[in-house]
């Protein structure tokens, strides 16, 4: 996934930031033994998920990959595997002669 932009969208950043704040609020109120504040923090965590999904549906999430892009990515992957096999010589029988019993 290093070559992708997984999660680098305004929807993801906003949703995670809100959820993180809610987690911190819930944690503080857990330490102070205040159940109402804890549940408010949990509500903020859930709000972060709702906001993130809402922003995704408004078009601020990852764009959908077209069929042409998917086909090109699949062909590039096949070419990479074929290139690696060609570099190995493609002879798996030679590898068996070096095995010991």
Image (spheres, rainbow, N blue to C red):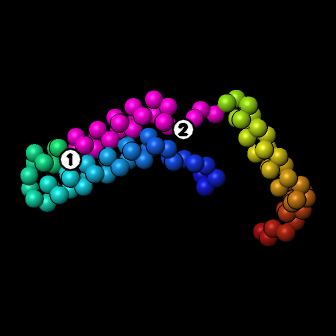
Residue at 81% x, 67% y is 99
Secondary structure mainly formed by the magenta segment: helix
Looking at the image, residue 88 sits to the left or right of residue 30; the answer is right
| Residue 17 visible in rendering | yes
Whether residue 43 is in magenta: the answer is yes
What is the CA distance from the residue labelled 2 to the residue labelled 1?
Answer: 28 Å
Where does the image place residue 95, in percent across and percent down from the top left? 85, 63
Residue 2 at what x, y percent from top left? 61, 55
Rendered residue at 75%/34% (across/down):
71
Query: Viewer-proximal residue, 38 or 55?
Result: 55
Q: Which residue is mark 1?
A: 41
Query: Which quadrant of the structure image shows residue 28?
Result: bottom left
The reply, left or right, for residue 54 in relation to residue 59 is: left
Per the rendered image, the range of residues in magenta is 41-65
Circle 2 is placed at which residue position? 62
Vertical relation: 48 (above or below) 83? above
Q: Position of residue 41 (x, y in %)?
A: 20, 47
Mark 1, Cα crowd under 10 Å, few <14 / some 14-19 / many 20+, is many
Q: Earlier in the sequence, mark 2 or mark 1?
A: 1
Residue contact at pointers 2 and 1, CB within 8 angstroms: no
Name above or below for residue 59 compared with residue 86. above
Residue 43 sits in quarter = top left
In magenta segment, residue 52: yes
Residues 18 and 84: in front is 18
Q: Residue at x 79, y 70 (%)?
A: 100
Q: Position of residue 58 (x, y in %)?
A: 45, 29
Q: Secondary structure at mark 1?
A: helix
């Amino acid at each position: 996934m290093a070559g992708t932009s997984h999660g680098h969208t305004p929807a993801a950043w906003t949703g995670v930031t809100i959820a993180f704040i809610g987690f911190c609020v819930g944690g503080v109120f857990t330490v102070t033994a205040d159940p109402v504040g804890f549940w408010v923090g949990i509500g903020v965590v859930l709000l972060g998920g709702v906001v993130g999904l809402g922003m995704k549906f408004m078009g601020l999430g990852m764009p959908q990959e077209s069929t042409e892009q998917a086909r090109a990515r699949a062909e590039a992957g096949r070419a990479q595997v074929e290139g690696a096999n060609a570099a190995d010589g493609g002879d798996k029988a030679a590898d068996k002669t070096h095995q010991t019993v």
